[in-house]
Amino acid sequence: MTSLNVVMVAAECVPFAKVGGLADVIGALPAALEKLGVAVSIAIPRHRVINLEKFGFEPYPAPGNARVPVGFESIPYDVHRGKLPNSSVDVFLLGNDRFFDRPGIYVDPATAKDYPDQADRWIFFQRAVMEFLKSGSPSPDILHCHDHQTGLIPAYLDRIYRTGYAYTQTRSIFTIHNMGYQGLFPRDVMTRSGFNDAEFYPASPFEFYGMVNFMKLGITYADLITTVSPTYAREIQGSDEFGYGLQGVLRNRSDRLIGILNGIDDEVWNPAKDPLIPATYTASNLSGKLENKRALLKKFGIDPSHLDWPLVAMISRIDVQKGFDLVVSILDYLLAKDLYFVLLGSGNKETEGYLRTVIERHPGKAGIRFEFDNGSAHLTEAGADIFLMPSKYEPCGLNQMYSLRYGTVPVVRRTGGLADTVQEFDPSTGTGTGFVFTAYQPEQLKMAVDRALALWPDKTAWRVVMLNGMRQELS
Ligand code: ADP
């Protein structure tokens, strides 16, 4: 029997190029599927940040004249092929320096804004994927598209490319990782992407409040839609707060929409064999955790003289989605207590400023690193005792799962994947893996953290909540 042939298409993939959790999933899911007997490959843009030499990427012949139309231009693309580490999954990088030889993946770091030619960049990439795979043998059974940067592909498949010999058996899956980013562009994108402007009219799949919406196209044309947790699948159909205007479009396709919880890569995020932390540890021997705590405090410039204090941590994009307004409003309150606080993250400059101001008021107890650094992320998961994730919304969230895996007890808001992965600890039964609050209010976050801090001195109970999390199935 020939195996199912799946091509994953996305903007980012670990370990080559990463902005957020999407990259973790694209780096982990294909290898997991391959173990189940699926033939998987990956297509992402050849971003500047990708180190071709380090990962052994080689030029790979593109079929035909290797050009794609964007508006009235015909633009060449090149292909490199490499492997996803620890697997035989092929990774194809589709490139053109005009669009992807840039310092940021989505945003220009110089302006902190989207690149002005954002639509053309993603049109180019998606058409290059369609052209590149068109004559491939075998042609893919499934094009698995992730987020709005690949939302045109289901429409391309259905409306333009399923002709003659190409893509006759191919089906599409569109996975929503975050409804907050939909890819909204002006009307001229109709012709720039190769569709007919006459199809742009109110309530057509192409129109969304006067704009073209790539995510709407993905949702409308995909054969199957998935999102990254069961709770988020319900939330995004339920209200504008989570659906960001597409809740009706999603409800229309509810028979084709399912929520499947993301899994974590157990090879990469595993305290028993993590090469990025000073001391490995397991559920049955936790002793290494204290050494990581000491190293983490030092890394953040904090004197580790009170190792008995709980160390509360955050790793996050600094964005309204992640609940930073709640954190800013309770931080002084928290830091008046006997605890340490560290934050690893970068993003909104104004919020960074507020956070810095609060933290500077508590020297010796709190530290902050406004950077994106994978090694520090691993050390933070391993060295902290409590992990804060009070998100306004959270499609799945990976950091709370890494925290569970590393015995770092999560305090989360009951939304999306956080609701599906963390259960409130009940001291009377010894069940539960963390501390959970519901209403998006500073008081509620404060109370949840206080419940965690109240349990901390009870070392036996604390060990139970840690172990419950470490033993949870998260693959
Ligand atoms: P999102 O994708 O919304 O940003 P997730 O929790 O799903 O949130 O995934 C975030 C991923 O990015 C995790 O792997 C996390 O460790 C990583 N990450 C976030 N901020 C940083 C940072 N400043 N440095 C290193 N890794 C980070």
Image (tube, grey):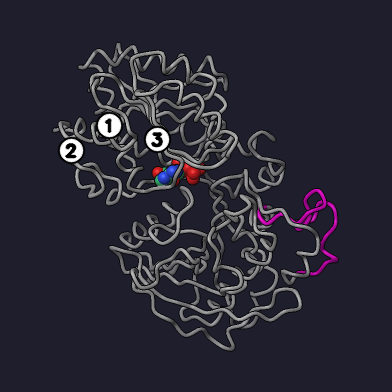
Image vertical order of residue 421 relative to residue 305, above or below: below
Compare residues 182 and 101 and report the one nearer the observer: 101
Majority SS type along the magenta span: loop
The residue sitting at the bottom extreme is 64
Crowd class of label 1 (few under 14; some 14 to 19; many from 20; radius 10 Å): many
Residue 407 is labelled as 1
Q: Name the quarter where the C terminus is drawn.
A: top left
In this figure, what is the number of numbered marks? 3
Q: Is residue 460 magenta?
A: no
| Quarter of the displayed picture in which ligand 1 can be seen | top left
Q: Which residue is mark 2?
A: 281
385 sits left or right of 239 in the view? left
Q: Rounded to the nearest whole Å, what is the CA distance between mark 2 and mark 1?
A: 10 Å
Residue 153 is labelled as none
Element class at badge 1:
loop
Element class at badge 2:
loop
Q: Is mark 2 in CB contact (under 8 Å) with mark 3?
A: no
Residue 304, horizontal then vertical, whole percent? 25, 26
249 sits left or right of 199 in the view? left
Q: Which residue is mark 3?
A: 400
Note whether ligand 1 is within 8 Å of mark 3: yes
Residue 327, horizontal then vertical, whole percent? 51, 25
Q: Is residue 87 visible?
A: yes
Compare residues 165 and 79 and report the one nearer the observer: 79
Element class at badge 3:
helix
What's drawn in magenta, residue-wise?
195-215
Residue 413, horizontal then vertical, whole percent? 49, 26
